[in-house]
Image (tube, rainbow, N blue to C red):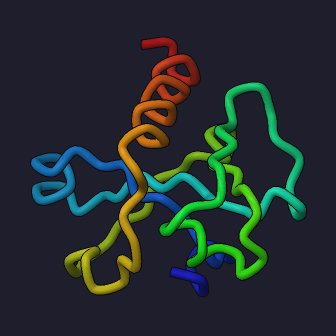
Amino acid sequence: MRDLTGLTHAVVVTEPVYSRLSRQQTVVPVFPESAFEAGELDIIAPASRWTRYVTERREPVILATSMIFTVFQREWITGYANGIVDPITMHRLDEALNLHFGL
């Protein structure tokens, strides 16, 4: 997805039925904490097993809720999924997205 978005890392937050039928993937950019200033709804996740895909420095990462977007994806997204975000971070991200969209 780097050529399409310019991003090197992101979390895909997509409801499976919607994704399968519409082939749309909801994407939240992820940056090393040292490379990005977190906004009010952005999530700072501590260094963990999955964050090593984003930064080699064992530093926290920022899930940029404020920069969420959707991409059309023809093929199954599992072809480029490297890691799985921990449940606590995903819960925090879900809450931030609900605030972002006023849900």
The image quarter in which residue 33 lies: bottom right
Q: Nearer the viewer, residue 1 or 12?
A: 12
Residue drawn at (56%, 62%) of the image = 48
Left or right: 81, with 79 as reference point: right
User: From the viewer's perspective, is residue 20 above or below residue 64?
Assistant: below
Instruction: Check the image and name the residue furthest to the top.
Output: 102
Residue drawn at (60%, 75%) of the image = 52
Q: Nearer the viewer, residue 74 or 49?
A: 49
Left or right: 17, with 15 as reference point: left
Provide residue 80's location: percent of width, then percent of height. Answer: 36, 83
Q: How many marks?
A: 0
Quadrant for the C terminus in the image: top left
User: From the viewer's perspective, is residue 8 above or below residue 27?
Assistant: below
Provide residue 93's location: percent of width, then percent of height. Answer: 50, 36
Provide residue 7's location: percent of width, then percent of height. Answer: 66, 73
Provide residue 66's location: percent of width, then percent of height. Answer: 68, 38
User: From the viewer's perspective, is residue 21 above or below residue 90?
Assistant: below
Residue drawn at (70%, 51%) of the image = 62
User: From the viewer's perspective, is residue 90 above or below residue 71?
Assistant: above
Residue drawn at (89%, 61%) of the image = 34
Q: Nearer the viewer, residue 93 or 5?
A: 93
Left or right: 61, with 15 as reference point: right
Left or right: 75, with 94 as reference point: left
Q: Nearer the viewer, residue 14 or 84?
A: 84
